């Protein structure tokens, strides 16, 4: 059951899409939305080495960055308030300053679902492309325990087809169960995909996962892919035109992902649909 939705707003293009998903989820669940805006003045104020006599120019650049970021956040908040008003969704705005990740971790403790951009949430466009690193965003949030979460793509699309990537791990099963019990989109077409396992093991995993989904009111399709998970999952997402991908994770696996690259991190970097990660 979802009663409180946490939404991170940093003034990026992904924020505009995230609010559409947040309002849709809150409306269908009878939930409220808490919008947390974060202006990281320390990061926005970094201008690099300042040459002699360049102090005024550096201060002007810092002030410009802050002004642009705040304007974009306010534009996004205006859009959020309008959508919430039109859909009868209660909304509360919390304005914060400091580390976005620490603040999101703190706020997530008292919310049922966190929603943020798949590849950008608090990576301020005014800092340029060098500031955009989705791996760091995901790692920090997941390691901090911000789950369940919904990471949304750059364009809004209604959720009609949901692909569950089931590896057989405890984390994957937990994500599947969390999604099914939430029933955020009860009328979706559900498909379960198992990759890499020997066929007999894969078929058994599919049968067990499908039985769980049926017990909760879904009638899922099943697919088995003998090859590697990375290309298999992305191929299925693309060919089936999935709107949402359900994946599992653990804090330890994300720490390793930053350095060696796992299936999960690969999906975050390349998937074009929304991702759901449960506890």
Image (cartoon, rainbow, N blue to C red):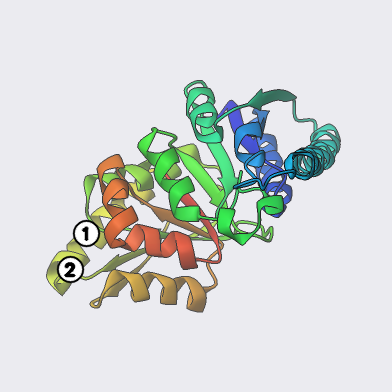
Q: Is residue 112 left or right of residue 129?
A: left
Please determine whether, in this image, residue 62 is positioned above or below residue 210. above
Residue hosting label 2: 197
Please determine whether, in this image, residue 232 is positioned above or below residue 173. below
Which of the 4 image quadrants contains residue 279? Answer: top left
Q: Is residue 1 left or right of residue 6?
A: left
Instruction: Answer yes or no: is residue 187 visible.
Output: no
- Residue 56 position in % (x across, y down): 79, 39
Q: Is residue 6 left or right of residue 172?
A: right
Front-lying residue, 187 or 132: 132
Instruction: Answer yes or no: is residue 222 visible.
Output: yes
- Residue 26 position in % (x across, y down): 66, 35
* Label 1: which secondary element: helix
Going 70% across and 24% down the picture, which residue do you hit? 95
Name, please, the residue furthest toward the front.
52
Front-lying residue, 68 or 275: 68
Disc 2 crowd, CA 10 A, few/some/many (<14, 14-19, 20+): some
Which of the 4 image quadrants contains residue 85? Answer: top right
Which callout, 1 or 2, points at the residue further toward the start of the chain? 2
Going 29% across and 43% down the picture, which residue do you hit? 250
| Front disc: 1 or 2 | 2
* Label 2: which secondary element: loop
In contact (CB < 8 Å): disc 1 and disc 2: yes
Going 44% across and 34% down the picture, which residue do you hit? 146
Q: CA distance from mark 1 to mark 2?
A: 9 Å
Front-lying residue, 229 or 116: 116
- Residue 133 position in % (x across, y down): 51, 55
Residue hosting label 1: 205
Please determine whether, in this image, residue 7 is positioned above or below residue 192. above
- Residue 163 position in % (x across, y down): 44, 61
* Residue 30: numbered disc: none
Which of the 4 image quadrants contains residue 219? Answer: bottom left
């Amino acid at each position: 059951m979802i009663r409180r939705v946490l939404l991170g707003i940093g003034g990026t293009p992904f924020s505009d899409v995230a609010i559409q998903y947040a309002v849709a989820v809150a409306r269908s669940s009878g939930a409220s939305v808490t919008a947390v805006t974060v202006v990281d003045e320390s990061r926005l104020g970094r201008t690099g080495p300042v040459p002699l006599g360049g102090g005024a120019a550096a201060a002007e650049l810092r002030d410009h960055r802050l002004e642009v970021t705040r304007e974009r956040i306010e534009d996004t908040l205006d859009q959020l308030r309008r959508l919430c008003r039109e859909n009868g969704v209660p909304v509360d705005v919390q304005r914060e300053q400091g580390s976005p990740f620490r603040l999101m971790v703190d706020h997530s403790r008292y919310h049922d679902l966190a929603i943020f951009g798949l590849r950008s949430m608090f990576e301020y466009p005014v800092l340029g492309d060098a500031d955009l690193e989705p791996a760091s965003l995901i790692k920090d949030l997941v390691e901090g325990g911000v789950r369940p979460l919904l990471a949304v793509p750059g364009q809004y699309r209604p959720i009609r087809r949901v692909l569950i990537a089931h590896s057989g791990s405890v984390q994957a099963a937990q994500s599947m169960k969390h999604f099914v019990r939430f029933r955020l989109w009860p009328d979706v077409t559900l498909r379960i995909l198992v990759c890499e396992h020997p066929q007999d093991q894969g078929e058994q995993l599919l049968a067990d996962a499908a039985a769980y989904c049926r017990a909760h009111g879904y009638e899922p399709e099943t697919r088995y892919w003998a090859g590697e998970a990375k290309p298999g999952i992305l191929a299925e997402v693309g060919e089936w035109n999935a709107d949402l991908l359900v994946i599992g994770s653990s804090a330890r696996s994300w720490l390793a992902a930053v350095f060696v690259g796992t299936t999960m991190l690969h999906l975050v970097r390349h998937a074009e649909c929304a991702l759901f990660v449960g506890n």
